[in-house]
Image (cartoon, grey):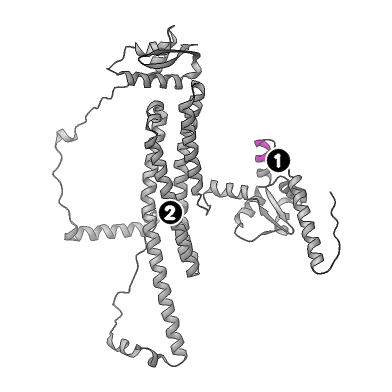
Amino acid sequence: MHYVCFAGRGNDNAKFRSSFLLGRFFYNFLTMNNFRSIDELIQALSREKALLKEMFAKRKTLSFRMDLAEPLVDYKMSRIQYLVDYGIIRDNGNFLELEDVYLKFFEEVLEVNEEINVESVKANIDHLNETIEYYLQETNESQKYNYLREVRRSLKNIALNTKRNVIDLKRNVDNTYKNEPNYKIKKAKLKHLDEKRDGIKLQIIEAEKVIDNQAAFFKIAMDADLRIVVDDLRYDLNESSHNLIEIEKQIIEYLNLIDYQSELLKKIRLVKYFRDQQVLETNTDVTNVLASRNPVWMEPNVGYRIKVSLDWLRGSDDGLSVLREVRGRKQNCNNLRKKLADPLDESEIAAQNIVIPMVDQTEMKNGFMATSTDLFYYVMNYSYPYEIDLEGKLVLFCQLASQFSDEFEITDKYEEAYGYEYPLIYAK
């Protein structure tokens, strides 16, 4: 494809330039290449890691100049063009920029992203509900096991994305208050972050509802791995909820500080204006206020408490000295002393054994592989080490069929017993 640029004046020249840039955009879009394998992608990123590292470090700037990129690729423009052709960076004349897909990938992996993606949690929750629905409707045991693995993956993604959103929210709140110089923008950003906090809280509630509302599924499909994933998810959601409460308190405190500082700044500017106009004594009661006060240098200043970092308290000598000082003050304060409980006797601290009856599913599978009966008959007539009801045997049948589906022969024939229809499963 060739481009022809016509000379013109005024609006005509601008129109021709716009047409030229538009044609160049579509040409780059149509001729963009794709990586054919993971090896090719990793090799390209590794070869140009110096350039990509520098561009990522300066991603906050408006653009990355071409003359800065040339030394990083040994002045071989073909290497830069290769990255452009494969959609890793984009060329804006004399400037280069990282493509959004790679920029977001680097930020998420390195956990330096500033965007709080609440929709990712919602997407995982929707995917989880769909997968559970497919599992309950599926009759093929092998496919049901694939859906079960997808459920476990969705639960892990919900926990991971929720924790990342909470961490990003906390970091953005602190950075906004400490680094944003404009009071109006700082206050607006904090309010938007508070809305993000409400969104994260809502998604946590929705995730907890899924676990409670899908009790039938979890009762049928629950195995050792799924139980661990569900318990971890409940713990992470509970921890994230408590962290959101602390973040809400922090946002409220920061907003109050901003209002206080903003009002104080307005008063200082007004007082300075009156003083410059030589009307301070006539337009204000500053003389009476100063006469009624008798401040001394030992009088405490008005302060607002800001929580210190836990890492600073734990990992620095100054933080440890502060903790020791606080502990010493509490020990010396009679009002904070607590009555100690009576010491424990030997019977209370003695080791106690708790026996939880369990069925060794691997042992049951090995025994079943040596028989010629179907799995349902084997489970119902198995000699259990403790009393187990019909519902427990049905759950055990489903768990064995899902966990060892690769070692069983699942037929298309069905029979009915105890009011339940079940497939005939034999050992291979």
Q: Position of residue 73 (x, y in %)?
A: 72, 51
Residue 33 horizontal side relative to residue 130, left or right:
right
Observer-nearest of 240 and 394: 394
**Residue 306 found in image quarter:** bottom left
Count of numbered labels shown in the rendering: 2
Does the segment drawn in magenta span residue 37? Answer: yes
Q: Is residue 228 above or below residue 357?
A: below
State if disc 2 and disc 1 touch (CB < 8 Å): no
Residue 81 horizontal side relative to residue 169, left or right:
right
Q: Which residue is mark 2?
A: 197
Q: Position of residue 420 (x, y in %)?
A: 39, 17
Give the mark nearest the N terminus, 1 or 2. 1
Distance between the Cα atoms at labels 1 and 2?
A: 38 Å
Instruction: Name the kind of residue labelled 2 in the image.
Output: Arg
- Crowding near the residue tagged with mark 2, few <14, some 14–19, many ≥20 C-alpha atoms within 10 Å: many
Disc number for residue 34: 1
Residue 214 horizontal side relative to residue 153, left or right:
left
Disc number for residue 238: none
Q: Is residue 347 above or below residue 376?
A: below
Q: Of helix, strand and loop, which one carries label 1?
A: loop
